[in-house]
Amino acid sequence: MKNYIHVRDNLYKVPYTRSNGRAANTYFIRHTCTTCQVEIYQHRTNYLKSEGRGYCSPECRNKARATLDGSVKRKRSKNSSEDHTLTKAADHPNARKGWVATHRLVMERHINRLLSDEERVHHIDMVSNNNKLENLYLCANTAAHNKAHASLNSCVAELIELGVLKFKNGEYHVKNSSSRN
């Protein structure tokens, strides 16, 4: 058992000696386990990173993650400005850190089965956070998904050739659109 020394409010320190012989302190925050309400001491850095959520054991942490509360968050893409929404579903077999892509959940509910790892869900309007069922199309694999995107590129080329779509000042515009031309 560590010798916690009260500093102020819910802040405690544990003195120790470094390898070079100098004295130092490690700081802890005293609070209650988010799941079972048992009093715990959490390292100050971990407490700040977890935004005040702390668990007394891995079992309590897993229990909290398994709660499907309908929380939604955005997943920022590293390669583009587009983002998908994720839904908290820790009990889902394909959950990653307790979250599943919302468009995959919507499609799974519609077809009444889990999607395989190979299957991809295509956003018809190309808006990756529009997860309405009528905007989603199930592709058998990545090749089929890439084919859907390639067909859009050929449509754009044809619309440019027909003069319906114009490219001006670094942007595409529909001819005679009320927006910028």
Image (cartoon, rainbow, N blue to C red):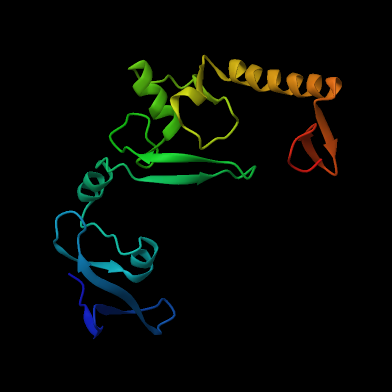
Front residue of 39 and 80: 80
Q: Is 140 placed left or right of 21 in the picture?
A: right
Q: Is 155 placed left or right of 69 in the picture?
A: right
In the figure, residue 12 lies in which quadrant? bottom left
Q: Residue at point 33% right, 66% down?
A: 47
132 in relation to 36, above or below:
above
x and y percentages locating residue 35 in the rendered image = 18, 54
Q: Residue at point 85% right, 44% down?
A: 169
32 in relation to 155, above or below:
below
Q: Is 37 placed left or right of 103 in the picture?
A: left
In the figure, residue 14 lies in which quadrant? bottom left
- Give the position of the N terminus as an image quadrant: bottom left
Q: Residue at point 59% right, 28% down?
A: 125
x and y percentages locating residue 56 in the rendered image = 20, 57
Q: Is 24 placed left or right of 168 in the picture?
A: left
Q: Residue at point 43% right, 19% down?
A: 116
- Give the position of the C terminus as an image quadrant: top right
x and y percentages locating residue 50 in the rendered image = 35, 60
Front residue of 12 and 157: 157
